[in-house]
Image (cartoon, grey):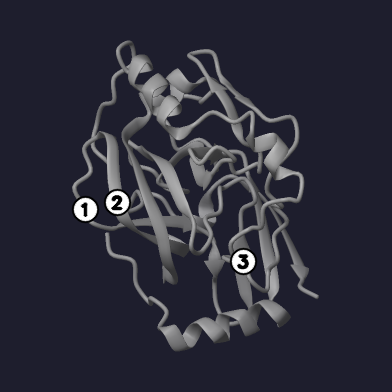
Amino acid sequence: MRLTNTTSERQRLQIKGLLLTAALVVAASRGAMADTKRGVATPLDALAGTAAIVEGSVKGFTYTFDPAAGPRTVATLSDIVTDFGSYRGSTLDIATLGGPINDKQGLFIPELPRLTDGTRYLVFLNNIDWFFSPVVESYVFRLEPGPNGAEVLIAPSGHAVVSLSSAGIEFTPDPVVDTHLDFLTPTAKLPLLDTASKQLAAAMSKDLFLATVGRLLTTTPLQGVFSPTPDTTRVWNKFDTVVETAPLR
C-alpha cells in the first residue's frame, strides 16, 4: 500500500496555521493500542508481538492522507541500529494514525505514542498487519543521557525506566519529561523537567535494558516480519471509537 498526498516542506507552515483555526477530531479508540495478536500486559506479551527492536533518531516529519489508511503523521528515523530481530533499512518511517484530514479538520488519538523532532528512540516494531501504529503498544522509548553518562529510557508517559523483568517494567515515581501537547508545535522535542536529574539517577541504562531483553528472548523469541505500511483491509474512519469534535483556540 502506498500513502499518498505527502506534504511538501512549504506545506508544513500551512499545517501549523491549520491547527490555529481548525476543528480537532479527538478519537478515543478501544482498539488503538490493540495492534497485537494478544493484549500486552507484560514485556513477554510485547516480545510475542515484536518483529524487531531498533534504535533511530527522528530527522523529520511528513503528513499523508489516503482514503483507507487515513491521515498519518510520519516520523522518519535515521541512523538506524537493529538490536534484535531483522530490519535492514537505513531509515525507518513510523506512520501513526492521526494528522490533518483536510484544511479544516485533523485527527488526534491520545492513546497512541507521539514521537518528536531531534529525539532518539528505542522502538519495538510490530510483527502483524498493524493499522494504528507500527509500534508494539507503547513500547517506544526516548533515549537520553543519564547523570552518569549512560543512555536511559523514557516511556511515552514521561517516566523513566527503572527495571525490566518478565513480569513488567518499573518506572520512576514521577515523570522526567513534560508530556503536555502543544497543538501549535506537536512535533517539538519535549523538555526535561527541572527535577529530572534526581529521577534519572535511579534509571536503568539502555545497555542493561537490552541485556535483560536478550535474556527474555530465550523464552519468548522474536518472530515474524515487520511491515512498513498499514493493513490494507481496514479503513480509518470505520474503527470502533468515541469521537469528539471541538474548535481549537
Q: Position of residue 221 (x, y in %)?
A: 29, 19
- The quarter of the displayed image where residue 155 is located: top right
Residue 132 x %, y %: 47, 48
Asked whether 149 or 231 is in front, the reply is 149
Q: Residue at x 47, y 55 (%)?
A: 96
Amino acid tagged 2: Ile
Kindly state the secondary structure of the residue where label 2 is placed.
strand
Residue 163 in the image: above or below residue 238: above
Seen as rendered, the residue at the extreme top is 219
Looking at marks 2 and 1 on the same chain, the residue that comes earlier in the sequence is marked by 2
Q: Determine which of the numbered discs, if any, sits on residue 186 in the image.
A: 3
Camera-near label (3 vs 2) is 2
Whether label 2 touches label 1, CB < 8 Å: yes
Q: CA distance from mark 3 to mark 1?
A: 26 Å
Select label 2 or label 1 by which is in front.
Answer: 2
Q: Residue 89: which numbered mark, if any? A: 1
Placement of 24 over or under 33, stated as above or below = below
Residue at 29%, 25% in the rendered image: 222
Determine which residue is flagged by label 2: 80
Type of amino acid at the residue the image marks with label 3: Pro
- Tell me the distance, in whole angstroms, between the alpha carbons under discs 2 and 1: 8 Å
